[in-house]
Amino acid sequence: MKYAGIIVDISHEKLDRTFQYSIPAELEEQVEIGSKVEILFNRRKITGYVVELSDDALIEPTKIKPIEGVVSDSVRMDSGMIKLAYWIKHNYGSTIINALKTVMPVKDKVKQDSRRTISLLISEKEAADIAMECDKKHKTAQARLLRTLCENPVTEYSLVMGKLNISASTVKSLEEKGYIEINSYEVFRNSINAGRMEKKNVELNSEQRFVTESIIEEIENNDNTPCLIKGVTGSGKTEVYMELISHVLAKGREVIVLIPEIALTYQTVMRFYSRFGDVVSIINSRLSKGEKYDRFRMAAEGRLKIMIGPRSALFTPFNNLGLIIIDEEHEGAYQSENAPRYHARETAIEIASMCGGKVILGSATPSLESYYRAKKGEYHLYRLNERAGNASLPDVDIVDLRDELRKGNRTVFSDRLSELIRDRLEKKEQIMLFLNRRGLKGFINCRSCGTVIKCPHCDVSLTEHSNNRLICHYCGYETSFGRVCPECGSKHIGTFKAGTQEVEKQTEQLFPGARVLRMDRDSTSGKDGHAAILEKFANGEADILIGTQMIVKGHDFSNVTLVGVLLADTSLHSQDYRASEVTFDILTQAAGRAGRGEKSGNVVIQTYDPESSCIRHAANQDFDSFYNEEIQYRQLLGYPPVKHMMSLRIACEDEALLTSSANILKEISDVEDNMQVIGPANATIYRINDIYYRMIYYKCSDNSVLVSVKDRIEKYIQENNMKNIKVLFDFR
C-alpha cells in the first residue's frame, strides 16, 4: 500500500498541516505529487493537494482513509512549486493551502479550443470533373464545395458551413465517398495583435554595451548574484533587457519579464514581440481563464520562451528558466495585497536560486531596499546615466500653489502651466496632465502656508476621524483638530478633494479647442480600455492626456513635450514612512515622460511644499542625493531598509475581543531584546463591514528574528484555538 500526504483545501490555522491518506490500487498510476484529489474529511467530500508520497503509514493502516478520486480537470503542480510554496509560507506567513494557490495562477484545466479543416484527397482535375457530374444531378452544394477545394485544397470547416452555406450532411457525403477528409487541431488562445509595429535595429551606446557585456560575462561565469540597473528615464534599459534575453534564449533557456500591470501596455509588449516574435506571450488580470490556461500550458510544453506580465507571471511553469527581469522594480504592485503578502523581488531571487537563473532589477528610481543592498554589495550595481539617442532630460519648474491662491487663482492650473499648455497647443505638440492620487484621502494640509499636521513620534501625517480627532495609525497618538492652521491661523486647511473628471472639465473650459482624453479607472473598464486610449494618444488623435499613475508608467510618446503634475503633495504626506520615496518615484517617472524624442521637454510640478527636498531632488532627477538624505531619516527612526519591519494586522468582529487579543499577541511576541514593538493601534480604516482591525509593528535588524516571532504568533493562535480572530503578516 502507498500513502499520500495531502494538504486539505481549507484555509484554517488548525488544518495547516498534511493529512495522510491511502492510495487505492486503481488510482496508483494517477496519483502523483502535485495532484488535486478528492478525499473524505470530517464526513464530507472535499479536495486537497498531494505534497508527498510514502510507503510507510504514520498511524495504524486500518485507520487511514483512502483517496476517493483524482480531479481530472485540475492542473498538477510540480515539486519545485510545492517547495516554493513552503518557502513563501515560512517567510511571509499564511496557511500552506494559500501559499500553494499563490504559486498556481492557473488551477483548473479549461476546455481546449479546436478548429476543423476540410482537405481535398483527390486531384484538382478529378474534383472538377466530379463537380460537373454533381451539377448534372442537381447536387449544387457538393459541386460548390468541390470547386472551392480546387482553389483552396485545405479550407476552414467554419468557412464552408458559414459563407458557403453548405450543410454537414453534404460534407459527410463527400467524406464517405473518399473525396475529402476532416481534420481537427487544437488552437491556443495566445493571439497578440502585432498591428503596425515595425522591427527596429537599435545600436547600443557605450553605457548600454558595458552593462550588457558585464552581465553576460556574469551569466557565463555562473555568477547568479542579482543585478540592479539604475538608469535615468529614457536611458534604454529595455534595449539592455532584450540583449540579455537574446543571450539567454541562445543558451536554450527561458525568460520571465515582470512589469507592473499598470505599465503593461500594448506599446511595451510590442517592443518585445517585434524582436522575438511568437515565442513571446503576456499574462495579466484581464485575460480569460482559457487564455491564461493556454499560455501557461504553452510555456510548460516549450512553445513559449518569454512570458511578460505582472506579479503572477513569476510562477510561469517554464522547464529551464534562465533569467527573471523585474522592470520598475521600485513599484509597490510587486508586493501582494493578500495573504501571503509575498514580494516578487525576494520570491524571484528564491526561484532563480532553485533553477540556477539570474535576476535583473531595473529602475530609474530603485527602491531604497534594492539600492541599500547594492551599496552593501549584495547586488551588483550598474548605471545608465544618459538618455538614449539624442534626447535630453526636461526642464522642470516647481510652482508654489500658495502663491497661486494669494493671486486669486482657484483653478487646478498655475499661470506657468497654463502658459506652457497654450504654447504646446500652438506648436501641435502633446501634453500629459498627471493627477497624483496616492494618499489623496486623509492628511490635513494648510493651503495658505503648506503646513501638514504630523505625528510627533512617527513623523507620518495624522488622519482625520470623527469628532474632530486626528490619529496616527502607527502608534495610536491622538490630538484634537481645531479647523484652523496651528502655524498661521488660516482657515484654508483640510483634506484634498480633486479628481480626473474635474480636471477634464476645467481643461475643456480653459482650452476649448484642445482634444482631450481622460485615462482613469472609469474610462478603462473594458478589456482593452488602456490600449485603446493610449493608441489614440500615440496616433496623435488627442492633444492632452489626463490621468493618474497609469499614464506615467513606462510610456514613450515622442511628441509629448510637456508634463504637468497637478498636485505633488498628496503622496508626500500620506500616512506611510515611505511617503517621500513614493513621491520622489512618481515625480521622477512623470517628469521622464517629457522630451523623450528629438524635441526638448518641460515639466511643471505644482505643490504647496516647494521647499521639500524630495520634490527638488525629483525635479533635478537626482536619485543619489535623495537616497543619501532619506537613508539618514530611515536610520534615525529605524525604518526599512536599515531595519526590517513586520506588521501584524489583527481582525475580529468583536471589538472587545480584538483589543484583548491584540494585547495578548503583543505580550507573547515582545520577547527579543533587540526588537522594537509599536502598538497595538487602530488600523487606518478601523472598521470595514463590521469587522474591526488593529495593528502591531515590529522592527529588528535581523529579519530571521521577525520570522521567528511570526512563527510564535501562529503557533500560539493555533494552540489556543483563537478561531475568532484573523491575522495578516506583512514583511518590509
Image (cartoon, rainbow, N blue to C red):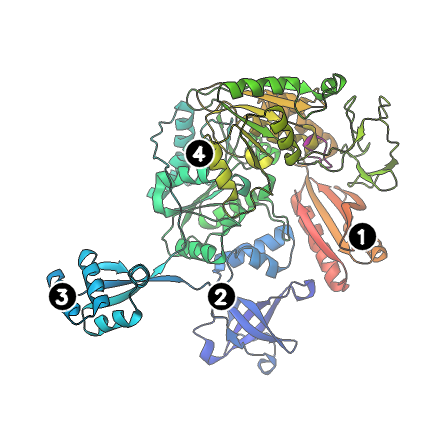
Which residue is under mark 3? Answer: 132
Q: Disc 2 marks which amino acid?
A: Ser
Left or right position of 14 against 235: right
Please give the residue where the numbered disc 2 appears in the rendered image: 74
Q: Is residue 330 visible?
A: no
The residue tagged 4 is: 238
Rounded to the nearest angstrom, the CA distance separating label 2 from label 1 is 40 Å
Kind of residue at disc 3: Met
Q: Do the CB atoms of the residues marked 2 and 1 lie less than 8 Å apart?
A: no
Q: Give the number of the mark in front: 3 or 2.
A: 3
Relative side of 426 to 125, left or right: right
- State the residue position of label 1: 662
| Quadrant housing residue 272 | top left
Give yes or no for residue 724 being in the magenta stretch.
no
Q: Which residue lies at the image location 38% right of the left edge and 35% below the top edge? A: 243
Of callouts 4 and 2, the N-terminal one: 2
Q: The magenta stretch spans which residues?
A: 571-578
Q: CA distance from mark 3 to mark 2?
A: 52 Å
Which mark is in front, 3 or 4? 3
